[in-house]
Image (cartoon, helix red, strand yellow):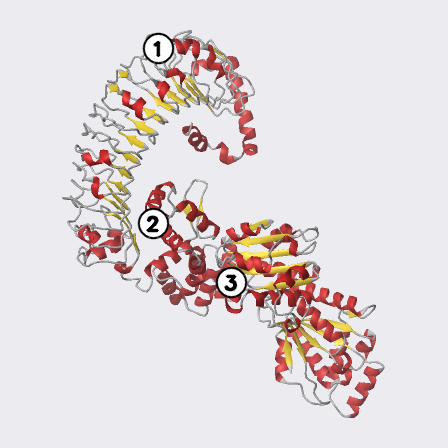
């Protein structure tokens, strides 16, 4: 009976079914070297065929045995004393040598207790056997040739202890297999560099136990890479095991069965010989050998705990390789190194696709453009390239065109289902989070959708991290949500389900043409749609063609359609077309309502109850006149009414709302009053910027300990009431800039112990009084164009807060001596703006301002001398300084990025020094990194200061 080793070792490449075929004379070697060699090969993860049947002398070899020879990549021929006495063996050898010539099979002869020359020349017993065959009138020429050719091949001669010799054979077979795999594997396109990088991280020759994780999205080549490195290095370990599909196999067979599989492979024992309970045995026995263990496609921490519990399970020099889609599992396991699988570049992708689609490594001219479209679609994902290649193989050009056109709407199920494995492992809230990002937020800065995701209770802070760890999304350095194109398409595939052409049955709607289709039946209740994004004012002829009967804009029926979406969690709509929401708008699951630039005059008529609404954003609704009663919105946390030009009436209920955290009514020029604040105990942010008809700050009648930000910038208030100092004691930011009618601040700044930012820019009528203004530990202080006809003594003698990072004293009429010499002790100061003042010199040294990056002295018409600058300076502006003659520019200003000076100032020594500095900067750019040297990058950096 024939038997073959079974293991989790990855299937041989190309058409090989077996790694090794053993050819031997059973009577000589079956129960000695061949039995031991077979076990050693199998334990090494080498799939080996060994025939266990004996044929009577003279019987013809079976067809099944010939097929086994043809399906083996390597043939190991064990020549023994009586090998030639079996015509069956000679028939095997003849067929093996034929496969060597025609199929590229590798043949390794083993000379067991026989001299190789006897085989080559058919001498002694081999000669006697052939004399007998010739006497029987058998055709032996082909057998003689096969023996001669095999005997001339490089092989191994049995010498010394048999165990040592068997190790030598296994090592030779492993090496020959590795060479074959690395040189002839259609699935391993682009493997060379990735394999080398992984081997480097594995540090095979070093001691200690290393666990290495291979992480990335499904179909990205993790298993292929792990299999390739396993094949190449397994011969260097005492015991090896490649457990493939751990996720699937643990579900089918259980973890205890997989533990037995590992022990069986590593200890070279049959599973039947192992005890029933191996949970304790696996830990104690693995540490006795130098082991190579690959756990492929792990998706649960319990799998790792059961199969590779910790580093101390293994002996010195052992290596454990784990492939997974979930980075979090690798962090839990405390692996030494995590390798993020890199997808194929365009050239590699094209080569892999062409091998599958065209059965060659390069494109046929007629298919070149179409092939590149497939490569663009796959975005380097090997899974997609293989599936598409197999799909298009043997198809004509017109079928390729048709298949690619279909992909736009209907992706290939094989690809989607494989990618969907990661999604299926998510928790329910994580699934909602992923689908929202895939459908709405890819390419957006994460801060924008964060508010929506938080409002809907999706807990994005922890959820986004989980999605990143599972390789479903990424967040770029710029803070943009991103993902692989096919991962996004998989999200769309899930949303559409079995109804790709029926958007009313989708859970999420984001395409304008789908919105228009839904509006065709606005009166039907909808229990499918959970999230909706629409830009109602967009002209949509490009989606519908030029048919004059096609809809151009979202119709007014959209209002009724939205009201009937009973499962809606959030809606974001630009240019909502109606003047109010529908009478039956009663969406109890709605958490986020954003209607930007709408035509609303009022949100709704009468009272509404939206028990879960947390965010209401009507910004840009220039026709909006009044707000609704807020009593029916008990969970409301944020109100955004920015740019509502005609807004006049704020319902008094807002002043009693206990859950509101933020209210922003910036740029509402018609707003004159705001209701008294009597119950807004959670309010943190209140903004009235540019409400230039607002002349009185709302009355505060309660402690507002949560208030941290208040902006009255650009309003008409004349007095800042004492209630702010009394009730808003935790205020961090107070913006009173451009309050041109402001005359007094009726509270002592000593009360605002946490104030970090104060803006009094342009408060021309404000007289600076003691009131502790200069005793607060500000980080940002802006006193631009504030009245300083008689500067406060604190400026001259006491100076400013040592925690200041940004100080603006633009156009404050400061003269010589008006600024305290203690200015030089502001060691944290990064930005100093003294533009438009009247001093001729700064009577303090700036050299000690070691953090100073930006210095602005422009329009200081009396300035004659520029002080010495610290090394940290990056931006210097001193244009329109007509009398400036002396500029101290040390040569070690290595961070200097921009200088703005008048041309007449740049002459003589100053000009030469600047030219020298510029040359050094140009030479030094590559060293500091091109990215950091880009002007726009530097500009962005200083905008943040």
Q: What separation in Å lies between label 2 and label 3 (alpha carbons)?
A: 31 Å
Earlier residue among tags 2 and 1: 2
Question: Considering the numbered disc 1 on the image, is that residue within a helix, a strand or a loop?
Answer: loop
Q: Nearer the viewer, residue 18 or 741?
A: 741
Of circles 2 and 3, the one toward us is: 3
**Where does residue 245 sit, x and y in percent of width and height?**
53, 64
Quadrant holding the N terminus: bottom right
Which residue is the extreme one toward the bottom?
136
What residue sits right under mark 3 in the picture?
247
What residue sits right under mark 1 in the picture?
813
Q: Residue at x 70, y 87 (%)?
A: 55
| Image position of 130 with respect to 233: above or below | below
Q: Nearer the viewer, residue 12 or 257?
A: 257
Of circles 1 and 3, the one toward us is: 3
Q: Nearer the viewer, residue 843 or 921?
A: 843
Question: Considering the numbered disc 2 on the image, is that residue within a helix, a strand or a loop?
Answer: helix
Q: Residue at x 35, y 21 (%)?
A: 751
Residue 440's label in the rendered image is 2
Q: What separation in Å lies between label 1 and label 3 (alpha carbons)?
A: 74 Å
Earlier residue among tags 1 and 3: 3
Callout count? 3
| Image position of 103 with respect to 593: above or below | below
- Answer with left or right where residue 51 lies relative to residue 783: right
């Amino acid at each position: 009976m024939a038997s073959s080793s079974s293991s989790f070792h990855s299937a041989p490449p190309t058409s090989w079914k077996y790694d090794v075929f053993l050819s031997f004379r059973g009577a000589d070697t079956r129960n000695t070297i061949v039995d031991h060699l077979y076990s050693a090969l199998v334990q090494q993860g080498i799939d080996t065929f060994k025939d266990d049947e004996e044929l009577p002398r003279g019987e013809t070899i079976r067809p099944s045995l010939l097929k086994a020879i043809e399906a083996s990549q390597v043939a190991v021929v064990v020549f023994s004393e009586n090998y030639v006495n079996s015509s069956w063996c000679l028939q095997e050898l003849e067929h093996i040598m034929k496969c060597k010539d025609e199929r590229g099979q590798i043949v390794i002869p083993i000379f067991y207790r026989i001299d190789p020359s006897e085989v080559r020349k058919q001498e002694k017993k081999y000669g006697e056997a052939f004399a007998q065959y010739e006497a029987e009138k058998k055709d032996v020429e082909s057998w003689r040739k096969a023996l001669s050719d095999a005997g001339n091949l490089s092989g191994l001669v049995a010498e010394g202890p048999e165990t040592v010799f068997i190790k030598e054979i296994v090592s030779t077979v492993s090496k020959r297999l590795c060479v074959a795999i690395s040189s002839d594997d259609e699935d391993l396109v682009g493997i060379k560099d990735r394999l080398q990088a992984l081997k480097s991280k594995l540090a095979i020759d070093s001691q200690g136990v290393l666990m290495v994780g291979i992480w990335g999205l499904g179909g990205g080549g993790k298993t292929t890479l792990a299999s390739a490195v396993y094949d190449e290095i397994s011969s260097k370990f005492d015991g090896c095991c490649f457990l493939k599909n751990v996720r699937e196999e643990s579900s089918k067979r259980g973890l205890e069965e997989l533990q037995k599989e590992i022990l069986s492979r590593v200890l070279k024992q049959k599973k039947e010989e192992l005890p029933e309970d191996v949970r304790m045995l696996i830990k104690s026995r693995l540490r006795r050998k130098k082991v190579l263990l690959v756990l492929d496609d792990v998706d649960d921490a319990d799998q790792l705990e059961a199969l590779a519990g910790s580093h101390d399970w293994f002996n010195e020099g052992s290596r454990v390789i784990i492939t997974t889609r979930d980075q979090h599992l690798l962090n839990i396991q405390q692996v030494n190194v995590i390798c993020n699988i890199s997808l194929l570049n365009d050239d590699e992708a094209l080569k892999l696709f062409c091998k599958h689609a065209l059965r060659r490594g390069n494109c046929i001219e007629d298919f070149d453009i179409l092939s590149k479209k497939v490569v663009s679609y796959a975005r380097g994902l090997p899974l997609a390239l293989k599936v598409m290649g197999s799909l298009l193989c043997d198809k004509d050009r017109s079928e390729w065109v048709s298949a690619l056109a279909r992909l736009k709407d209907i992706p290939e199920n094989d690809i989607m289902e494989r990618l969907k494995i990661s999604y299926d492992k998510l928790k329910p809230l994580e699934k909602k989070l992923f689908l929202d990002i895939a459908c709405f937020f890819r390419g957006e800065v994460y801060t924008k959708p964060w508010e929506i995701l938080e409002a809907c209770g999706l807990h994005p802070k922890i959820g986004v991290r989980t999605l990143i760890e599972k390789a479903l999304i990424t967040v770029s350095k710029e803070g943009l949500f991103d993902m692989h194109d096919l991962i996004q398409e998989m999200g769309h595939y899930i949303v559409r389900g079995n109804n790709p052409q029926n958007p009313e049955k989708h859970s999420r709607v984001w395409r304008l043409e789908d919105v228009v289709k839904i509006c065709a039946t606005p009166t039907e209740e909808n229990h499918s749609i959970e999230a909706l994004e629409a830009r109602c004012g967009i002209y949509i002829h490009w989606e519908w063609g030029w048919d004059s009967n096609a809809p151009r804009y979202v119709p007014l029926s959209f209002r009724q359609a939205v009201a009937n979406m009973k499962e809606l969690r959030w809606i974001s709509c630009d240019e909502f077309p109606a003047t109010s929401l529908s009478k039956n708008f009663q969406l109890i699951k709605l958490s986020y309502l954003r209607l930007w630039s709408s035509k609303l005059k009022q949100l709704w008529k009468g009272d509404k109850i939206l028990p879960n609404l947390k965010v209401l954003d009507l910004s840009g609704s220039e026709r909006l006149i009044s707000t609704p009663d807020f009593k029916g919105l008990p969970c409301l946390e944020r109100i955004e009414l920015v740019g509502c030009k005609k807004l006049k009436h704020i319902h008094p209920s807002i002043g009693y709302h206990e859950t509101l955290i933020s209210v922003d009514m910036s740029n509402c020029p018609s707003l004159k009053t705001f209701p008294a604040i009597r119950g807004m105990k959670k309010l943190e942010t209140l903004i009235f910027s540019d409400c230039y008809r607002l002349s009185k700050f709302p009355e505060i009648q309660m402690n507002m300990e949560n208030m941290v930000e208040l902006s009255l910038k650009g309003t008409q208030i004349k007095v800042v009431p004492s209630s702010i100092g009394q009730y808003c004691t935790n205020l961090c930011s107070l913006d009173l800039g451009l309050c041109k009618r402001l005359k007094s601040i009726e509270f002592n700044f000593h009360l605002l112990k946490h104030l970090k930012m104060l803006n009094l820019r342009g408060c021309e009528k404000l007289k600076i009084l003691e009131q502790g203004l200069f005793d607060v530990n500000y980080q940002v202080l802006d006193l631009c164009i504030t009245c300083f006809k008689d500067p406060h003594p604190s400026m001259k003698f006491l100076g400013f807060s040592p925690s200041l990072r940004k100080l603006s004293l633009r156009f404050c009429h400061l003269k010589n001596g008006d600024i305290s010499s203690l200015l030089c002790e502001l060691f944290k100061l990064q930005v100093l703006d003294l533009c438009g003042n009247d001093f001729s010199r700064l009577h303090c040294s700036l050299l000690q301002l070691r953090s100073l990056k930006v210095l602005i002295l422009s329009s200081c018409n009396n300035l004659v001398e520029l002080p010495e600058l610290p090394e940290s300076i990056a931006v210097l502006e001193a244009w329109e300084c007509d009398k400036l003659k002396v500029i101290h520019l040390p040569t070690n200003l290595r961070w200097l990025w921009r200088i703005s000076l008048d041309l007449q100032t740049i002459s003589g020594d100053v000009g030469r020094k600047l030219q020298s500095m510029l040359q050094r900067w140009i030479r030094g750019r590559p060293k500091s990194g091109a990215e950091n040297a880009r002007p726009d990058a530097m500009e962005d950096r200083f905008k943040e200061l």
